[in-house]
Image (cartoon, helix red, strand yellow):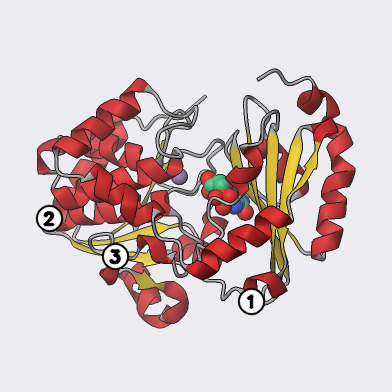
Amino acid sequence: MPLIMIEQSILEITSDLSKANRIVIVPHKGPDGDAIGSTLGLYHFLKDKGHDVVVISPNDYPQFLKWLPGQENILIYENQREHCNSLINNAEIIFTLDFNMLDRTGEMAEPLAAAEATIVMIDHHPEPSDYADHTYSDAGMSSTCQMVYKFIQKLRGLKSITPEIATCLYTGIMTDTGSFKYRSVTSDTHVVVADLIAKGADNTLIHQKIYDTYSENRLKLLGIALQNLVVIREYKTAYITLSQEELDENNFQKGDTEGFVNFGLSIEGVVLAVIFIEHKQDGLIKMSLRSKGDFSVNELARAHFSGGGHLNAAGGKSDLSLEETVQKFNHILPEYIHELSNREL
Ligand code: 5GP
Ligand code: MN
């Protein structure tokens, strides 16, 4: 069951916001469009209300988001720990957006846990942990951006949504829903998106800025990823691997592999798609998992790859080699034979 923020929390936050000035907003490590869109949307809203607001991201974010209004003011924790720690220590309210466990912020988890500020979680991942003073969690929402819109609505602030806020929130809803096609999209999502367009989000321009941004290197890397595609019909599964060498040869930039996993899922009859990406520097293989129907990649990632996420989109990692990780994946597939092979689409 989604845990919806109780009205009492809204009253308390409203009261806190009428006094507090120093506000920090934090997305998860490796932030995506929803994480950056939601933090910046809330940033503009609170800043416009006169608060002293700063967004601190645990690490850098993809190039395709580096045009969003206000992104130039985002602080990167890895690059200036001391300054960020002092902002966290002095904050009166800290909003944590688009994640449900503090350790999703990497090394920021420690200063955040020690902070004296009131902590507010706004997030749409299932099974939230209870680190926040106010938890606004709703796994029925398409995106954290849709929730920030709802949060602003609860604060009676819809009239204050500027084109900048609308642009940030539209971007996150669009990227987290595969451009409004996932099952998480409801009629309410479209009502929200319609209002964001009415309030100044330029939908065509946003699509272009996010999706029509391939560099030649990125397109070549996609070619290699597709060459490496393996389809296992028996398990209705497709996977892609990318080694560090392949990334290096194509001048890999953060965000370049975003969306590659979806090509596996676009094969007719495939229910489960995975991409394994080697990160030599971290000694890790990072995985993105996607599924169709009610096959839970959240469960698979939690059970076997120290990860998690949503029913149809999850992430995970492994400290084995690339080959060993793929081998491990192949070994666990039989565990899911019934769930995968009996799947009717
Ligand atoms: P992506 O594959 O795009 O990195 O992530 C898909 C979804 O899974 C996102 O909602 C993301 O928040 C979640 N996710 C990705 N990596 C992890 C992880 O290591 N742990 C958990 N709990 N969730 C993750
Ligand atoms: Mn999200």
Q: Amino acid at mark 2?
A: Asp
Identify residue for label 3.
Answer: 71
Q: Amino acid at mark 3?
A: Gln
Q: Is residue 264 left or right of residue 152?
A: right
Marks 3/1: CA–CA distance: 27 Å
In the rendered image, the vertical position of residue 244 relative to residue 160, given as above or below: below
Q: Amino acid at mark 1?
A: Asp
Instruction: Locate the C terminus and report the quarter of the image it occupies.
Output: top right
Point 60% across, 33% down: residue:
311
Secondary structure under the numbered disc 2 in the rendered image: helix
User: Residue 281 falls in which quadrant of the image?
Assistant: bottom right
Q: Is residue 239 left or right of residue 147?
A: right
Name the front one of labels 2 and 1: 1
Upstream in sequence: badge 3 or badge 1: 3
Q: Position of residue 56 (x, y in %)?
A: 37, 66
Marks 2/1: CA–CA distance: 43 Å
Marks 3/2: CA–CA distance: 16 Å
From the viewer's side, name the closer residue of 38 and 16: 38
Identify residue for label 1.
Answer: 248
Any mark on residue 177, and which? none
Q: Is residue 324 left or right of residue 6?
A: right
Point 64% across, 25% down: residue:
294
Secondary structure under the numbered disc 1 in the rendered image: helix
Identify residue for label 2.
Answer: 48
Q: Position of residue 139 (x, y in %)?
A: 48, 32
Q: Position of residue 227 (x, y in %)?
A: 71, 56
Q: Position of residue 249 (x, y in %)?
A: 64, 76
